[in-house]
């Protein structure tokens, strides 16, 4: 294995042309490092990983890549994310290692990835199931359930969704629907629509966060960790942490 002397993150970013793709790839790559329990920002994570790669060798790298992709492959089998999303974890990881002169048998790895379906085979939830779900005592749940039911998005879409991806549609100054950009910046990007009720719940959730002290912008993640929900806080409102699809 030959490892480049240039900063690993710099090498990785050099291989990405689109600014939007750069943002998404960095997020996915960080997910891989977090899976390996490497904390810190992406610059530190990438350097630390490459130090470990040098010390532990090719078999260690291959084993961890396989564990990470197998984890998401199993999520796809459970219907939590789409098959295409599994490949979206594969692509930035492959690019990062290739740009840092780490050679793996990518054909062998890709052979085990699920093929993307052209059409979903999901069952729509019943009204009784929806009513049961929205009873859950979590201030985020109505926004999540209403959005997923009206737009048809998968769990994996929450890894991408930001407040700026939601655009209200009005008629006579009344919100009648909202457009939602799903997987923004990815090859599988598409748009859908949500009901005015779903938009109202999202807006209410964002307003709650803003009133509590969080700075809300178009780049704010739609879902984040909770804060001040018990005697001891679970998070800081001013330092939001994205709630990933695995946590929904």
Image (cartoon, rainbow, N blue to C red):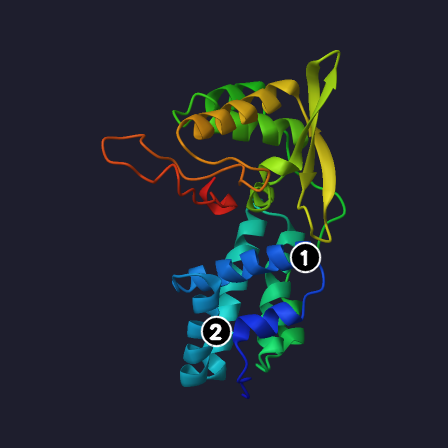
User: Within 10 angstroms of label 2, few (less than 14), some, or many (20 or more) residues?
Assistant: few
**Residue 245 image offset from top left, x and y in percent:** 51, 44
Q: Quadrant of residue 88?
A: bottom right
| Alpha carbons under labels 1 and 2: distance apart | 31 Å
Q: Residue furthest bottom?
A: 2
Q: Which quadrant is home to the N terminus?
A: bottom right
What residue does disc 2 label? 63
**Residue 205 image offset from top left, x and y in percent:** 49, 27
Q: Quadrant of residue 176?
A: top right
Which residue appears at 65% of the width and 19% of the height? 196
**Residue 104 image offset from top left, x and y in percent:** 59, 79
Residue 19 is labelled as 1
Which residue appears at 43% of the width and 42% of the height? 240
Taking depth in this image into account, of 146 and 50 the one nearest to the observer is: 50
**Residue 149 image offset from top left, x and y in percent:** 62, 28
Q: Which tag is nearer the camera, tag 1 or tag 2?
A: 1
Mark 1 and mark 2 lie on one chain; the one further toward the N terminus is 1
Taking depth in this image into account, of 54 and 69 the one nearest to the observer is: 54
Residue 169 is labelled as none
Q: Secondary structure at mark 1?
A: helix
């Amino acid at each position: 294995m030959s490892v480049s002397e240039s900063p690993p993150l710099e090498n990785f970013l050099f291989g990405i042309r689109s600014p939007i793709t750069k943002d998404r790839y960095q997020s996915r790559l960080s997910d891989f490092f977090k899976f390996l329990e490497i904390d810190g920002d992406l610059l530190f994570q990438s350097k630390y990983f490459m130090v470990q790669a040098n010390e532990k060798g090719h078999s260690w790298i291959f084993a961890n890549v396989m564990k990470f992709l197998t984890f998401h492959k199993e999520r796809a089998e459970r219907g939590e994310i789409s098959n295409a999303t599994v490949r979206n974890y594969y692509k930035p990881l492959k690019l990062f290692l290739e740009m840092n002169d780490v050679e793996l048998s990518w054909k062998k790895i890709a052979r085990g990835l699920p093929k993307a379906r052209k059409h979903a085979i999901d069952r729509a939830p019943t009204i009784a199931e929806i009513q049961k779900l929205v009873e859950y005592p979590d201030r985020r749940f109505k926004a999540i359930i209403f959005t997923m039911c009206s737009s048809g998005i998968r769990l994996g879409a929450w890894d991408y969704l930001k407040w700026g991806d939601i655009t209200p549609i009005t008629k006579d100054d009344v919100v009648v629907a909202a457009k939602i950009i799903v997987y923004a910046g990815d090859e599988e990007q598409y748009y859908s629509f949500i009901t005015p009720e779903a938009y109202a719940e999202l807006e209410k959730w964002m307003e709650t966060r803003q009133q509590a002290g969080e700075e809300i912008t178009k780049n704010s993640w739609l879902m984040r960790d909770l804060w001040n929900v018990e005697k001891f806080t679970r998070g800081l409102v001013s330092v939001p942490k994205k709630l990933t699809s695995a946590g929904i």
